[in-house]
Image (cartoon, rainbow, N blue to C red):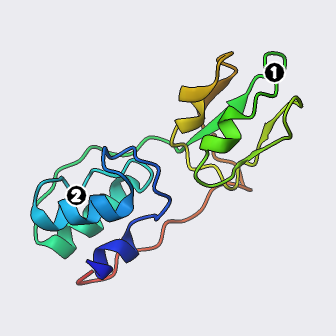
Amino acid sequence: REEIMELLPGVNCGQCGYPGCGGAADALIAGAASPALCPPGGSVLARTLAVKLGRTLEIAADGPPLLAQIDESRCIGCAHCGKRCPTDAIIGAPKQIHAVFQEACMGCGLCVDVCPTECLQLHPQTPTFATWYWPKPMLAGV
C-alpha cells in the first residue's frame, strides 16, 4: 500500500470517486479500480500504476494541462473556491477578488463546482518557454 501511496499525488481531491488517495490506493490493490483513476496524475501516473500492479492499460494521449481561471468581473469574494482547493492555489480574502496561483493549480475543477457566480473555468494551459517542460523518461521496471 505504501508504494502505491507514494505514486499518487496525495492531494485527496476525490476526482477518482474515492475518499482520498488512501481509498484510491486500497481500491487499486483490491483490483476494484483502474490504474487510470486519477485525473490529476494523467497518463504518466496511469502507466506507472499499471506497470507496478502488473496490469495492462490502453489510454488515449493527454491533452494540455488544465488550469483554473477567474473572471474577476464576476468574482464576489465568497471564498468557497479557496476552501475547496486541495492545493491552496486560490488566493484571496473574503469579500475580495480572488486569483489563481497557476504554479499550484492542478486543474482538478473542485473550485469550479462550488463557485456560485460561475466565474471560475478550467482552460488548457498554453505551453510557453516558462511553462513547458520535458517530461522525465520512464524508468525501466517502474
Please give the name of the residue rendered at 34% of the width and 65% of the height, measured from the top-left corner: 22
| Residue under pointer 2 | 35
Residue 133 at x, y percent in the picture: 59, 62
The correct choice, above or below, for 114 with respect to 38 in the image is above
Q: Which mark is residue 10?
A: none
Q: Secondary structure at mark 1?
A: loop
Q: Which mark is residue 76?
A: 1
Residue 114 at x, y percent in the picture: 58, 28
Task: Look at the numbered discs 1 and 2 and tell me whether their residues touch, using CB distance below 8 Å.
Answer: no
Q: Secondary structure at mark 2?
A: loop
Give the class, few, some or many, for how many residues have Cα within 10 Å of label 2's Cα (few <14, many ≥20): many
Instruction: Point out the image quarter for the N terminus.
Output: bottom left
Instruction: Point out the image quarter for the C terminus.
Output: bottom left
Label 1 vs label 2, nearer the camera: 1
Q: Please state if 58 lies on the left or on the right of 25 as rendered.
A: left
Q: Earlier in the sequence, mark 1 or mark 2?
A: 2
